[in-house]
Image: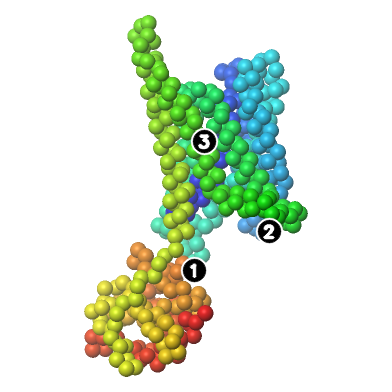
Amino acid sequence: MLQQFVGALSGALAPALLVMTLSVLLGVGEGRDVPLSRNWRLYGLLVGLGAVVVFTVLRLLVIVDRRSGVNLPVLIGAVSCDVLMLVVMAGSGRFRREWHQHPIRLHAANGVAAIGIALTTFFALQDVIMQLTSFVETGESAFTSKMLLRALGFALGVGTAVAVAAIFRTMRTTAVHGSFLTASMLMLLILLVCHATQLCSLLMSLMLVEFDGASFTVLIAAANNDTRMVIAQALVFIIPVIASVVAGLRMKPVGENDAVIRTHKAFRRRAMASAVWSLVGMIVVAAALTAGVAKLHEQPTLSPPEGYSLHGATATIPFSKVDDGHLHRFQYKAKDGTVMRFIIIKKNGGAYGVGLDACMTCGDAGYYEKNGKIICKRCEVEMNVATIGFKGGCNPIPFPYRAAHGKITIHTPDLDALSSHFKD
């Protein structure tokens, strides 16, 4: 669930913010007094969404087996449109004021915005839409609690991105216009850097362009901080947050009559509410894309080895030490000096699963217990506890043992013979 949430949020946030800022900066007119190009930005969003869905289907059908052939022109167009959209944003105030006298300017601005939204949406949502194919993993039934949690995580991620953009949009009437414009242009500038970084990385991977020295260092630094770039796109809206708070504090609850006083009070409430909720949105984005990403990349640690009795060539572990149904890890030093690990877990029915803390597939990565499940540390496959002690797949490598008279007995020569599984 967390993986789907973080992936969907990081991918959907940029298109959501871009659509929101352009709708605020280029929105003009009411009722029938609206420009012909009013809905072009919406059409751009729909085209981008439709294109990425079709592209995903073509990838799944292996009709398109390389994304680079499609993404190269998309990124070139996205970078070009980002530059043009910066110009559009800078002149948005003039375009709106003079749109009756010069409608062509506003049409051109909306046209650039529509193309930029379509290209950004297409590129940003490729991995997001691909997540839909991972809701049901191989071997699982179609409707399981895991599938529902993955779907919920995906929906929450997309919903959070849209909600954050909608919350930021409320500051259009409470913050100084210049502060909102500044934040919007900074957001777009960061998006331009992200697109340019992706384009340069793609050109380098296709060996069309070669980077070295300082340019290569800058490219790698930008590529390694892509998540921080996404967070920064949200955090720049701290500028209108501050402006909204200042505007609210300056609006005194006084006036010529009660109606004016109520209007001032209402504005002050809206300004403070917009600022507070926008801060909450920033915190949610920053927390999800820092703590959430860190949690996803967190490497599980193996529990420390437990003690047991070793006399001569016999290791003895009493049932009472391992009869709680949890994973127990033990360590043994083989005759050739190799430090080995083996695990024991009591299975349903009273039998014991005994094997090396290693498998034929993943080597000596080991196993850990999480939420009552035994998981391979390297491939993250969940073990069927009933099969621990048997050969095959990612199961722990079994070895002979004897369970009788209240204890598990292991002859250490059997462990010595398997020491090669723990050698580099």
Identified by mark 1, the residue type is Cys
User: Mark 1, mark 2: which one is toward the viewer?
Assistant: 1
Structural distance between the alpha carbons of marks 1 and 2: 25 Å
Name the element at disc 3.
loop
Q: Can the viewer see residue 68 in this picture?
A: no
- In the rendered view, would you say 151 is above or below 20? below
Where is residue 102, by image quadrant?
top right
Name the element at disc 1.
loop
Total labels drawn: 3
Q: Along the horizontal axis of the image, is 412 left or right of 213?
A: left
Q: Residues within 10 Å of mark 1 (few under 14, many from 20)?
A: few
User: Mark 1, mark 3: which one is toward the viewer?
Assistant: 3
Q: In the rendered structure, which disc, 3 or 2, sits on the residue that comes first in sequence?
A: 2
Q: Which residue was labeled with disc 2? A: 65
Structural distance between the alpha carbons of marks 3 and 2: 37 Å
Which residue is painted at 52% across and 41% down in the image?
A: 232
Q: Along the horizontal axis of the image, is 220 left or right of 270?
A: right
Contact between labelled residues 2 and 1, with CB atoms less than 8 Å apart: no
User: Mark 3, mark 2: which one is toward the viewer?
Assistant: 3
Q: In the rendered structure, which disc, 1 or 2, sits on the residue that comes first in sequence?
A: 2
Q: Which residue was labeled with disc 3? A: 236
Identified by mark 3, the residue type is Val
Q: Which residue was labeled with disc 1? A: 379
Which residue in the rendered view is the most extreme toward the right? 208
Q: Looking at the rendering, in which quadrant would you find the N terminus?
A: bottom left
Q: Which percent across, then down, holds residue 29? A: 58, 18
Q: How crowded is mark 2: few (under 14 residues within 10 Å), some or many (20 or more)?
A: few
